[in-house]
Image (cartoon, rainbow, N blue to C red):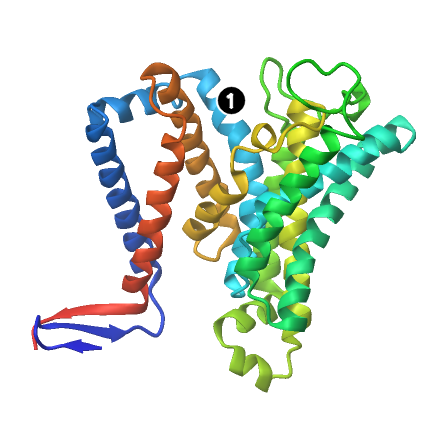
Amino acid sequence: MDDRGCGVRLEPLANASPGRVLGVTLAALGLAFVLVGAVFVAYGQNPLEVYRIMLTGTLLDAKGWQEILRRSIPLLLIGVGLTLAFRAQFYNIGAEGQLLLGAVLAAGVALFVPLPAPLSLPAMALAGALGGALWCGLAAWLRLRFSVNEILSTLMLNYVAQSLVIFLINGPWRGKDVRGYIYSDRFAEYQQIPVWAGSSVHWPTLLLGVLLALLMQLLLSRTTLGFRMRIVGENPGAARYLGIAQGRVLLLLALITGGLAGLAGVGEIAGIHHRLIEPSQLSSGYGFTAIIVAWLARGHPALVLLTAPLMGLVLAGGDLLKVSLNMPFRIVDIFSGVILFCLIGSELFLRYRVRWGR
């Protein structure tokens, strides 16, 4: 592209260097914090003071660290799956619904399937992963069979999942001891994931997320399947030339990314709430925030180990601002939206080199 009027040329880049990717990503984040700072000014707050409260109330406080870790667990699991999906150009925007479906199937096992105590929690995890996988697999099948855009299908399936949860806990699964809010009966103690003492950090799920991030990185970079995933996303024409079954690769990716989101749902209901509850209480938009986690990871699942806690810090800090400064409930959504907007805009500088002059 060449705009001679303003003397700006965009030269295509074959591949952005790691240094360029890091620099552009940090610049995008910096711009996002400046723009959000302007929002704080409009609300009558000093941005520097707001950021000071966010950091000191989280990073310099033991309870703050616990909250960051608690928030990071679902972001880690979902983010790893989305990183793989985005790398293969499968844009799954429905992780929120897949999390909810995972929670539904896990709760169904907990409430209605009589199993020996040692088998109940593993069965819940398996059912949750299956629920999320099938929910995302449906969108992949619609794309492969009818060319339905997965962005639209996964997004719409989010609302179906939300409606299903509300129907169940307000109808056939409504708890016997419901007071005010609607929810299911409480799970048995042996169906609850252990947590660190004095916190809501369900450490087995956290450990599982770390292991899966490393495993998916090895899968992507060291295996034949990983090569196929990369080539399908980076060069579909070459994938066809090599005889790679792109439909099978995309379907497998959908099952993996949906399954990980389903596991995140299991972690939330078995590790924190111990019952099936309303969607807005079950997930604080983790499926959408994990999109930012994955985008920041730039196609590398292992980097989600860094980007998930970063967004966990944003979520935990946002909750702190609501309490300390009486800021609006949706301030975290503004924060996340601006970060995503800046990251998407930064893609221009990863695909092109900007030249000034003729």
Figure quadrant of residue 245: bottom right
- What's the residue at 65%, 68% (across, down)? 249
Q: Is residue 157 above or below residue 327?
A: below
Q: Position of residue 234 (x, y in %)?
A: 48, 72
Q: Is residue 9 above or below residue 162?
A: below
Figure quadrant of residue 351: bottom left
Q: Nearer the viewer, residue 296 or 339?
A: 339
Q: Position of residue 61 (x, y in %)?
A: 41, 16
- The C terminus, quarter of image: bottom left
Image side of residue 320 versus residue 308, left or right: left
Figure quadrant of residue 248: bottom right
Total numbered badges shown on the rendered structure: 1
Q: Position of residue 247 (x, y in %)?
A: 66, 72
Q: Position of residue 312 (x, y in %)?
A: 46, 33
Image side of residue 334 versus residue 167, left or right: left
- Label 1: how many residues lie within 10 Å, few (<14), some (14-19) or many (20+)? some
Q: Nearer the viewer, residue 14 or 143?
A: 143
Q: Determine whether the residue tagged by mark 1 lies in a helix, strand or loop.
A: helix
Image side of residue 164 versus residue 329, left or right: right
- What's the residue at 59%, 24% (across, down)? 201
- What's the residue at 60%, 65% (across, down)? 226
Q: Mark 1 is on which residue type?
A: Gln
Q: Nearer the viewer, residue 10 or 156?
A: 156
Residue 63 visible in this rendered orientation of the protein: yes
Q: Residue furthest bottom?
A: 241
- The N terminus, quarter of image: bottom left
Residue 19 visible in this rendered orientation of the protein: no
Which residue in the structure is indicated by mark 1?
A: 66
